[in-house]
Image (tube, rainbow, N blue to C red):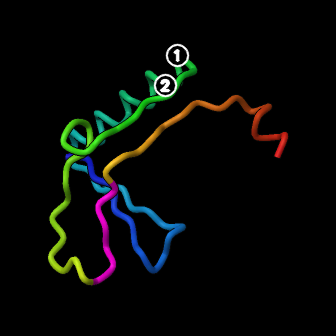
Amino acid sequence: MLSFIGYTEAEEQIEIVADEQGIDDLILYLQGIKEGKDHMHLIIDSEINPYPISNPKAGVIVIKHVRLEYADTEQWLLN
């Protein structure tokens, strides 16, 4: 299981929730991106699992799409 959770009251915050398999999958995704110097889209019901939210009115949302991207250090220094 691999889930990403966001909060309407804290837009700058996300939480990653994963079991052992989800952590292993995320590591593989990141290694592939690093080796290929590329990017990857993680999509709900494919790489991302829906997380059960007990009270959806509490401002908690399940993130349905995550883009992971390699960026060379030089790109970071330009900002």
Would residue 37 be found to the left or right of residue 2 on screen?
right
Q: Is residue 34 above or below residue 1?
A: above
Q: Is residue 65 above or below residue 52?
A: above
Q: Amino acid at mark 1?
A: Gly
The residue depicted at 20 percent of the width and 59 percent of the height is 51
The residue depicted at 57 percent of the width and 20 percent of the height is 37
Measure the alpha-carbon separation of dots 1 and 2: 5 Å
Circle 2 crowding by C-alpha within 10 Å: few under 14, some 14–19, many from 20: some
Q: Position of residue 30 (x, y in %)?
A: 44, 31
Q: Position of residue 33 (x, y in %)?
A: 49, 25
Q: Kindly state the secondary structure of the residue where label 1 is placed.
A: helix
Q: Position of residue 54 (x, y in %)?
A: 15, 76
Q: Is residue 59 magenta?
A: yes
Mark 1, residue position = 36
Q: Position of residue 78 (x, y in %)?
A: 84, 40
Circle 1 crowding by C-alpha within 10 Å: few under 14, some 14–19, many from 20: few
The residue depicted at 40 percent of the width and 72 percent of the height is 7
> Nearest the camera: 31 or 5?
5
Mark 2, residue position = 33
Q: Quadrant of residue 46?
A: top left
Q: Amino acid at mark 2?
A: Ile
Q: Kindly state the secondary structure of the residue where label 2 is placed.
A: helix
Q: Quadrant of residue 24?
A: top left
Would residue 52 be found to the left or right of residue 13 on screen?
left
Q: What stretch of residues is rendered in magenta?
A: 58-63
Marks 1 and 2: CB-CB under 8 Å?
yes
